[in-house]
Amino acid sequence: MNRQFSNVGTSKKLSAQYANAFTSWLRGAGNPGTEMMAALNEGSNPAGGFAVPVIVDGQIVPLAPIDAGVRSLATVITTTSDMKVPFETTAATATAKPEASAFVAVSPAFGSFTLSAFMAGGQNDLTFEIFQDAKTLPGFVIGDMLRAQQNIEEPWFISGTGVGQPQGLLGNVGAGVTEEPDSAGNLVTINGASDLIGSLNSEYLPNAAFLMNRATATILRKAQTVGGVFYQAWTRENGVDYLHGFRVAYSASMPTAVRGATPILFGDFERGYLIGDRGSSDLAVKMLDQTKALQGLVSILTYRRTDGRVRRPDAIQSYTIAAS
């Protein structure tokens, strides 16, 4: 069937297929417009997209965890109860002894701190349906909660109060050095890092490392160029950064470089900071399938009990930027 329509003196001929389709669309079960026909392409769903299968990748790409460097540097032990940890506060001294005179007894003095355990964790609820249908999701949730655990523990290890939470490093280790910015305006400097190394007792140097955030490291890399002259202070070996030959660990919880802040710590963290995990250092995972069963939910509970304390304040020294 051919039809012609007049338009300003011109004539257009429509195909029989189009005419029949248009008529069918108009009549559409007594409701014009209810029947759709379109070209077979993927430009839109009515135009063929409904026939194209969609596959969801089973691999969920997680958000990156924060830089958490303290656990990798400190001594980490497991505990079964609160533990009293002794340490020396005053060393024994020797004195000159004149002939026929008595020795002077000067004994060492000791102190102690309590290594306890503080709970932190989280709960995630998954519906029965998604637990069955999304096979990779429970494993992803557990990994995500491990990252969440790092996000709460690392700030404690850096600046925790020690009351109801671990004791942080900042303010509880050696005063180290207070430095001015360099002539180029870099708030932390290569020379300042050298001074910090010099402030640490040589006893602790063999296992010493730097701890800072990545923004501070960027400033120090720029500070290698002074007055147009480049001084090589940074190196990288097997994926590990070194400054002045000492390993650099990164923590997102370390302060940024501003006046009055302490953006860098340096020392033997293994001897200077003690972390105690109650029972195990592994993240405890419990799957509760009864608690919210009537709501159609499975609860995944993750937690760890931990504490951290400065054991040897002189083993770690601080780099503080002058306040003014």
Image (cartoon, rainbow, N blue to C red):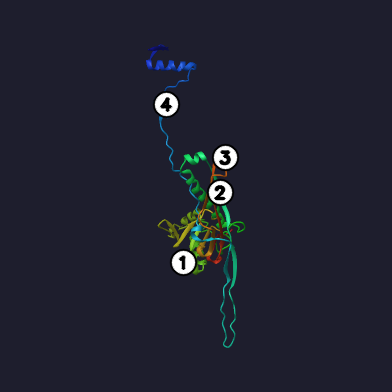
Type of residue at label 4?
Ala
Is disc 2 surrounded by few (<14), some (14 to 19) or many (20+) residues within 10 Å?
Answer: some
Is disc 4 surrounded by few (<14), some (14 to 19) or many (20+) residues within 10 Å?
Answer: some
Type of residue at label 2?
Gly
Secondary structure under badge 4? helix
Q: Is residue 267 visible?
A: no
Q: Position of residue 95 (x, y in %)?
A: 57, 80
Give the mark nearest the N terminus, 1 or 4.
Answer: 4
Q: Position of residue 129 (x, y in %)?
A: 50, 38
Secondary structure under badge 2? strand
CA distance separating discs 1 and 4:
70 Å
Please give the name of the residue rendered at 54% of the width and 41% of the height, measured from the top-left corner: 297
Q: How many marks?
A: 4
Find disc 3 in the rendering and name its residue.
295
Find disc 4 in the rendering and name its residue.
47
Type of residue at label 3?
Gln
Secondary structure under badge 1? helix
Give the mark nearest the N terminus, 2 or 4.
Answer: 4
Location of residue 258 with respect to 292 vertically, above or below:
below
Find disc 2 in the rendering and name its residue.
122
Please give the name of the residue rendered at 47% of the width and 55% of the height, measured from the top-left corner: 222
Q: Would you identify the image quadrant in which residue 55 lies?
A: top left
Give the mark nearest the N terminus, 3 or 2.
Answer: 2
Give the mark nearest the N terminus, 2 or 1.
Answer: 2
